[in-house]
Image (cartoon, rainbow, N blue to C red):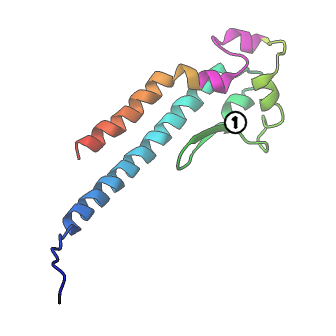
Amino acid sequence: MLDFKISLNIKEIERYLDKIGDKISSELRVAKKDIGKMVVKTSAKYSPELKGDLKRSIKYKAKRNQIDIFVRRQSKAGKYAYIRHYDKYKYGKKTLSKANAGRLFIQRAIEDNEKNIQKRLEKVLTRAKNI
């Protein structure tokens, strides 16, 4: 004897959900790049300066669940970026001439951009709702 069975075809729903997922992934990928660029730009403004190697060496990498802001060890500033970020030291004339320049330049750039980061991520969610 056959069981009583009702099948629901959800292919259209699956296609729609896939479309939304693709759209959100695409929007989020762009947002992470925008956020990375925003923080790098602010970090460069806040970084101590002698020759400008440090500010030019600040990079970002957007990953699946995070955005890394960093200075590569192999870059010209790689040897002293950590020290300039975390340690206390005497500032030179160029650093003193820059507003907000000094220690914790990457960390402060993230904190100072917190509202802009939040707005950018909210924009992704708003677009996702309108799909």
Q: Closest to the observer: 100 or 113?
A: 113
Count residues near mark 1 (Cα–Cα under 10 Å), then give few for <14, some for 14-19, many for 20+: many
> Residue drawn at (67%, 22%), measured in percent from left and top?
105
Answer left or right for 125 relative to 73: left
Name above or below for residue 99 compared with residue 29: above
> Residue drawn at (69%, 9%), measured in percent from left and top?
97
Q: Position of residue 31 (x, y in %)?
A: 43, 40
Q: Which residue is mark 1?
A: 57
Helix or strand or loop: what does disc 1 sit on?
helix
Answer left or right for 2 relative to 27: left
Name above or below for residue 98 compared with residue 47: above
Q: Closest to the observer: 97 or 131?
A: 131
Q: Quadrant of the N terminus?
A: bottom left
Question: In the current view of this chain or complex, which residue is farthest to the front?
Answer: 1
> Residue drawn at (37%, 45%), measured in percent from left and top?
27
Answer left or right for 64 relative to 96: left
Q: Position of residue 9 (x, y in %)?
A: 18, 70
Q: Position of residue 88 (x, y in %)?
A: 82, 16
Q: Which residues are magenta?
A: 93-109
Res 121 quadrant in image: top left
Say whether residue 3 is magenta.
no
Res 53 quadrant in image: top right
Say whether residue 96 is magenta.
yes
Q: Position of residue 19 (x, y in %)?
A: 29, 58
How many labels, in total?
Answer: 1
Q: Closest to the observer: 32 or 18?
A: 18
Three-letter amino acid code at the position of disc 1: Ser
Question: In the current view of this chain or complex, which residue is farthest to the bottom?
Answer: 1
Res 91 quadrant in image: top right
Name above or below for residue 92 compared with residue 32: above
Name above or below for residue 66 compared with residue 22: above
